Image: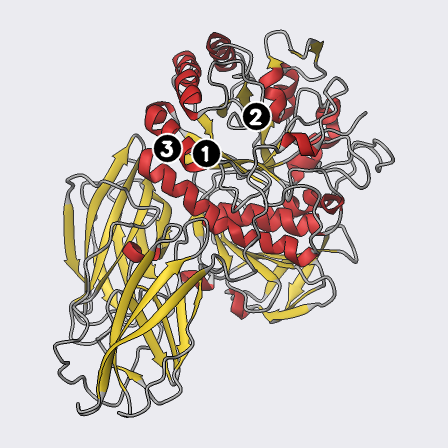
Amino acid sequence: MTIRSRRWGSSAAALALTAATTVAAVTVGATSAPADTGAACSAAYTIGWQTPSDSPPDFGVTVTVTNNASYPITGWTISWNYTAGQSIIAGSPYSATVTQNGTTVTATPGGSYNATLAPAASTTWGFHATYNGTSNPVPTVTCSGPSQGSASATLSGPLTPLGVNTASWDTNFVDPAISTYLNNSHTGLIRYPGGSWADEYFWQTNTAKGQTQPVNFAQYSSQVDSISGGQKFVTVNYGQDTAASAGAWAKQAATTAGQNVSLWEIANENYGSWETDNHTGAHTAAAYASNGLAYMQAIKSADPKAQVCYDYAMDGGLAPGSGVTDFQNWNSTILQADAANIDCADVHWYPINGVPTESVQSIMELIDNIPAAAAEVKSALTTYDPKAYFVVGETNMSQTANEWNEEPVGALFSAANALEWLANGAQSVDWWDVHNYGTPTADFGMFSSASSGEPAMDTPYAPYYGYALASKLAVSGAKVSTLNVSTPNIYGYSSSQPGGSYSVLLANADPSNAYTVSTSSLGITSNSETEYVYSAANPTIAQSTFTGGTLSIPAESVVVLTNGTGISPSTSPSPSPSASPSHSASASPSASASASPSASASPSHSASASPSASPSASATGSSAGCTVSWSLVNSWGGGFQLGFTVTDSGTAATTGWTVGWSWPGSQTVSQIWNATDTQTGAAVSAVNMSYNGALSPGGSTTFGLNGNGATPASLPNLSCTAH
C-alpha cells in the first residue's frame, strides 16, 4: 500500500498525495512557545513622578503590558528586583495584584478585564512607592505569559474524553484486537469515515472515488458498540453529497438499533483547498455558512437530539500544521450565521508542519501553546455561540507521517496533549489515527499496519500507551487540572475523580536525566498508590504498588500514580504575601497617577460579551472582611453562565478568599475561571487563584463559571470568607 497524507488518510484507491501538496493553505513558519513560559509578552516600567522632599521620598510608576504574540494570552506575570531599597506603598497598586518580598516584586492582572490581551493589545497599571531620595534606578522588568499549572476543568459532558479517528478504508479497524485495546485505554469517541476521505465518501453506497469501501457504517457502528463507552462521531460528505443525504443518514442512525451517533460534523477542514468541495464559492466562510446550514438543519430535522459540529479554523501561529489564513473571519462568519444550529466546534491541532526535525524536549514544549489555542477557541464561542462546546477531532504532533510518532516521545506527547486540552476545556480529544499504513519511519497511527516492514498488525505504537496512561486521569466526572511542577522538563496533571480517588500523571521530556519530586508537592495525601510507568528504557506499561514520599520519574517517561487520595495544589487556597513596607503612605502630589481605572473592554475569554439584565444577590461572609455578589450572565437550554464579584469589605488586606453556596437543584459546574471549585452534593466552594487572592480594603476581583442544569434563580447559603 502507498503512504498517504494525513488529510486523506490511507486507502488502496487513494491518490498518492504528498504532504507538500496537502498543506498549501496552511500558515507556516511560526515557532513554538518555550516550555513553562507560554505566550510572549513585554512590559514597560515608567516613573511618572518622584518627590525627594516628601517624607519619606516617594514616586509613582505606571507599567504597560503588551502581548507580543500572534494569539491572545489569558494572563501575565510581571517581575523585577529593586536594587536601591525601593518599597511599594501598601494599598497603592491599581489594576494589578502586586506583591513585594524583600527586593523582589511580582505583579499579576487586577481581574479578568485586563488578564486577557489580544495580539498587540496592551494594558496599564501602576502604584506608588518610596525610595531614598537620591537613587531610584529603573529596574529590568520581565514578562511571562500563562504557565502550566493554571488550567482546570470537570469532565462533565456526555462525550467520552478520549477518542481516535478511523476511516472507511481501514480494513483492520474491525479487528477484535482493536476493540480490546480501545476498551483497555477507555478510548471511545471514534471519528469516521476518515478526514478528507469523508468528503469523498457516499454512505448510502459505501463508496469513495467509485470504489466500494472495506468498512461500511454498519460495520463501523458494530465495532464502536463493542467498545465500553464507545460513541460515534461522523463527518458527513459536504464536498460532493447533499444535505438530503446527510438528513437520511441521521434518520437511519436515529431509528436503527446500534447506529446512534453522538456527534455529527459538516465537512472536514472545508477551509482548506486540499478538500473536495463542489459548491460555488468553495472553501469560503460565506459559502460554508450558507450551504452548511442546510446540512445542519437536515440532520436536526431528522433527529432533533442530534449534536452538530462545524469546522473550526485554527490559528497558524499556534499550530503551523493545521493553521488557516484569516482564521478569525472564518470562525466569526460561520458562528454569526449558524449559531442556532451549531452545538460544537471541531478543532484540529497539529503543532508541527512537515516532518519534525525537533528534539524530544522541543516536541514536548509544543504543549505550552495549548492554553493560548484553547483561549482563542473559547473566545470565539463565547462571543458568538455561548452554548457551544468544542472537541479536538484530530491531533498528532504533525500533519505529516513521521518516525517520532513511533518513538517513546509519542507516548509522552499523546498523554500530555490530551490532558492539557481536557484541562483547558475540550470535551474530547481524538488522536489521528487508528491505522495509517505507513513505514517504520513514517507513520502516525496508534497501531501498526504491518506495512512496508512495520511490526505485526495491530501492534500498539507509543501514542496508544500515552492514551492508556492518560485514561487513568481522563475519567468522566473527574476534575482534571494541570500541575505546576517546578522541576524542569516535567509536565504534570492531576485528576480528582468521583468517589474521592486522586491521580497524577508526570511526563519527563528529558531524554537523559531522571528526576524526583515529593508526592506531597503533587497534592497526594495517601500512603500507597498504584503506579504505572512507561519509559524509553522500557517502552511498555509496568504496574506496581508505590509507597513513600519521593517519586522517581525516569528519563523520557510517563509515570502515573492512581487510586490515591489528595487534592491538586492548584485547587487549594494559596495565600500570597502582601507588600509590607515599614512606613505609611504619605500624601501624593498632584502629578501622581490617577485612581484605579474602570474595567476595559477586553473581558475574560469565558465571560459573555453582552450580559443581559439578570437576578443578583449578595451575602456577607462569616468573617467581616469579605462580601460577594453574583449575577446571571447568560443562559441556554441545559446550561447557564454566572458572574461573581468578591469585595474586601474590611479594614485589612486579604491574602485569599473562599466563596460558598448551595445549588437549588442538581446543577453542576462545567467550567470555572479566575477561581477553582470543589462540589460535594449541592454544596460548592470556590477558592481564589494565586493572582487574585490579595485584595486591599475596598478592592474587588471577579470570577465566573459555566454550569449544567436548570438556570438558578437563587444561590442558597451564599457566603464569602476572607483569609
Q: Nearer the viewer, mark 1 or mark 3?
A: 3
State the image coordinates of residue 548 (x, y, percent, origin top left). Answer: 63, 70
Image quarter where the N terminus lies is: top right
- Label 1 Cα crowd, 10 Å radius (few <14 / some 14-19 / many 20+): few
Question: Residue 282 got which mark?
Answer: none
Mark nearer the N terminus (1 vs 2): 1
Give the structural element (helix, strand or loop) at label 2: loop
Q: Position of residue 331 (x, y in %)?
A: 41, 33
The dot on residue 158 is 1
Q: Residues within 10 Å of mark 2 (few under 14, many from 20)?
A: some
Given contact means CB atoms under 8 Å apart, are the residues at marks 1 and 3 in contact? no
In the image, what residue type sits under mark 1?
A: Pro
Q: Quadrant of the C terminus?
A: bottom left
Residue type of the residue flagged with mark 3: Ser
Whole-percent x and y of residue 213? 70, 14
Q: Nearer the viewer, mark 1 or mark 2?
A: 2
Vertical position of residue 720 compared to residue 388: above or below: below
Total marks placed: 3
Say whether residue 299 is visible: yes
Decide which of 78, 192 is in the foreground and name it. 78
Callout 1 touching callout 2 (CB < 8 Å) = no
Residue 403: which quarter of the image? top right
The residue that mark 3 highlights is 332
Q: Which residue is mark 2?
A: 273
Secondary structure of the residue carrying tag 3 is: helix
